[in-house]
Amino acid sequence: MRFKSGSDIGLKRDENQDAVRCEYFGDNVLAVVCDGMGGENSGKEASTIAIEEFFLRFSKGYNESLSDEEIRKLLIASVSAANSVIYTSAKLNYKNFGMGTTCVASFVTDKSAFIANVGDSRAYLIVENEGIFRITTDHNVASLLYEQGRITKEEAETHPQKHMLVKAVGVEQTVQADTFILDYENSIRLLLCSDGLSGYCTDEEIYDVIMSSDYDNVTENLIALALEKGGRDNVTVAVIYE
């Protein structure tokens, strides 16, 4: 199993408030992408705390004998741990009021991929000769309106409130992550990304870049795609190959 990750400030922002981290747990891989929000340095602080607390909680709770359901619950607990620390930090310092972050995480074993997300950072499954399939659901106003049947899927993609989150890590006292389990045979290819990529590039464009890139330069090419689209946000990606 292999992974690569990368992050870029983009062309319009003064600070990179995204964070990414990937690590091996034995032969398995844990990858997390966070996109922070908040005034001044609060967004960067939120995403950094989220990554650190997520890995700390997961590391404490993980062992190789865990069942699929126990791994899923551990991902939820890791998101909750990050949420508690960020929420408390914001309460203790008025400068951090409103700080929070998205979080999308994937733990990949030799037979399953476990995914958790809060916010609008995404996880995709890439299948050669078939296409790219979004696993996660965005927790933003546009997606909520689409789920309610008030706008079309096409309208959701360009809606002026598509970047306005309805759920994030650290904003409320508690948060519930969505979770997904994908079983596979032989191989799997996953992409985790912030909306600096998915918010400005189509799924088809992302798929084409991944399929035309070597493993060694796939993350750089995905970031380059976002920059070609104007680089209006920080862009962060992690790819996992099995």
Image (cartoon, rainbow, N blue to C red):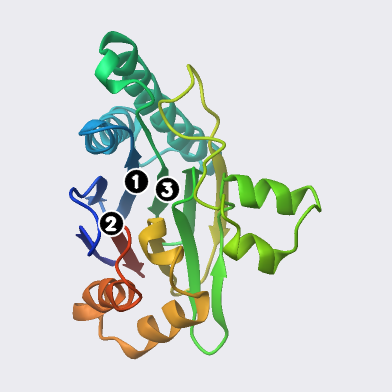
Q: Is residue 68 above or below residue 89?
A: below
Tag 2 and tag 1, C-beta contact below 8 Å: yes
Which residue is the site of mark 1?
35
Vertical placement of 93 versus 75: above or below?
Answer: above
Which SS class for mark 3? strand
Does any portion of residue 120 appear in the rendered image?
Answer: yes
Residue 148, numbered circle: none
Locate residue 241, reporting x and y percent. Answer: 34, 70
Q: Which image quarter holds the N terminus? A: bottom left
Q: Earlier in the sequence, mark 3 or mark 2?
A: 3
Q: What residue type is labelled 3?
A: Val
User: Who's the residue at 44% across and 52% down the image?
Assistant: 121
Position of 20 compared to 97: left or right?
left
Identity, as a three-letter code, of the amino acid under mark 2:
Asn
CB under 8 Å between callouts 3 and 1?
Answer: no
Residue at position x 53%, y 67% in the image: 184
Q: Residue at x 25, y 45 (%)?
A: 17
- The crowding category of the residue bearing disc 3, from other C-alpha atoms within 10 Å (few below 14, some 14 to 19, many at least 20), is many
Q: How far apart are marks 2 and 1 (CA)?
A: 8 Å
Q: Which mark is residue 234?
A: 2
Q: Which amino acid, by three-letter code, is at mark 1?
A: Asp
Instruction: State the residue position of label 3.
Output: 104
Quarter of the picture holding the C terminus: bottom left
Nearer to me, 31 or 15: 15
Q: Earlier in the sequence, mark 3 or mark 1?
A: 1
Displayed quadrant of residue 176: top right
